[in-house]
Amino acid sequence: MAGSAALELKSVGKRFGDTDVLSDIDLSVERGEIICLVGRSGCGKSTLLRIVAGVETPDRGSVSLNGSAVADSAVFVEPEKRNIGFVFQDYALFPHLTVEQNVMFGLRTLAKAEARRRAMEMIEHVHLQELAKRYPHTLSGGEQQRVALARALAPQPGLLLMDEPFSNLDRGLRDNVREETLGLLRQLGTTAIMVTHDPEEALSAGDRVVLMQRGRIVQSGTGYEIHDNPKTRYAADFFCAFNKIEGRVRQGRVETPLGLLGDASDLPDGLAAVAYVRPNAISIIEDNTAKDGIAGEILSRVFLGEIEQLGIAVPGLPGDLRVRTMQRTPAKTKAVRFGIDPKGVLIFT
């Protein structure tokens, strides 16, 4: 149906026993959009994916693909009739079939010559044409993942679902394969939903990030929006290891051992609040004899290449203040003064 979303969920709910696994899920995915579904283990990500796929039925609400209902109180379309592709965490390749045969497996309704042509076209897209006659056990993890992607895309699905597709790969390889995969999906204009538990992966991979907590969508937006403007403590904690400084509202700010922080102009004086301070919002003042800034003492250092992570003790502050900085402080430096960028401070109650 022209103008309709590729996928639309309205008030979807699912219960297992006495537990609401999904509650009031509303989600619309546009054609060609790549969505990252993210949240802690048990938040309902995979169950939501299974409902979209048709291997679970919703107890409440409706699921539509391209404007047509595939699951509601009166309709249920079988998984194989939904034109959905899948990429699993373990790739699920057939060990007795070659790369070419694995990719052709989903094209059995086509004439053999056409199936082979389309399979080889997709194999070329993932740069495995020289390995087309090889078997899965002879391939690296990254190559197996690309075979799984080619097999999922060969039937030209209207929607691609990926459940933790890169989690079995080593870190460096995972980043490369993910970039290749996303590049191909965008080149082909494929609509996709990717489930991940990795905050960095979610922020970098999708056109939109959908954060779940206890079976509900708690925030949705671009990676920039959801990282820079988390609406809840859960969202803030999920995407950044903030310093959490307790205090009370005074004259539109929060009074803490670090001074007055953040914007609390919409909160009443005296209310208990927490200032969330990003570690990279703290900058060391090079002249530690200066009168401006906040005084502290470096207790720990971890060199991470481009950045250094410092633990700074501040009088009146329980625990160390975590700082991530590109500045280089001499190894023997202990006493420091530092400033805080107001843009890196969020206030929660």
Image (cartoon, rainbow, N blue to C red):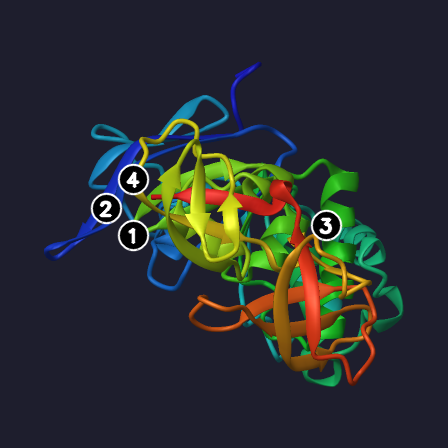
Q: Amino acid at mark 1?
A: Arg
As measured in the structure, the alpha-carbon distance from the residue carrying label 1 to the one carrying label 2 is 12 Å
Give the left or right position of residue 75, taking residue 266 as reference.
Answer: left
The residue that appears at 55% across and 45% down in the rendered structure is: 345
Q: Amino acid at mark 2?
A: Lys
Residue at which label 3 appears? 182
* x and y, in percent, of residue 199 in the image: 56, 57
* x and y, in percent, of residue 148 in the image: 65, 63
* x and y, in percent, of residue 214 in the image: 29, 52
The disc, 2 or 3, on the residue closer to the chain's N-terminal end is 2
The residue that appears at 58% across and 67% down in the rendered structure is: 322
Check if mark 4's residue and mark 3's residue have beta carbons within 8 Å: no
Q: Amino acid at mark 3?
A: Leu
Residue at which label 4 appears? 270
Closer to the eye: label 4 or 3: 4
The disc, 1 or 3, on the residue closer to the chain's N-terminal end is 3
Label drawn at residue 214: 1
Front residue of this view, candidates 122 and 41: 41
Give the left or right position of residue 112, taking residue 208 as reference.
Answer: right
Closer to the eye: label 1 or 3: 1
The residue that appears at 67% across and 39% down in the rendered structure is: 190
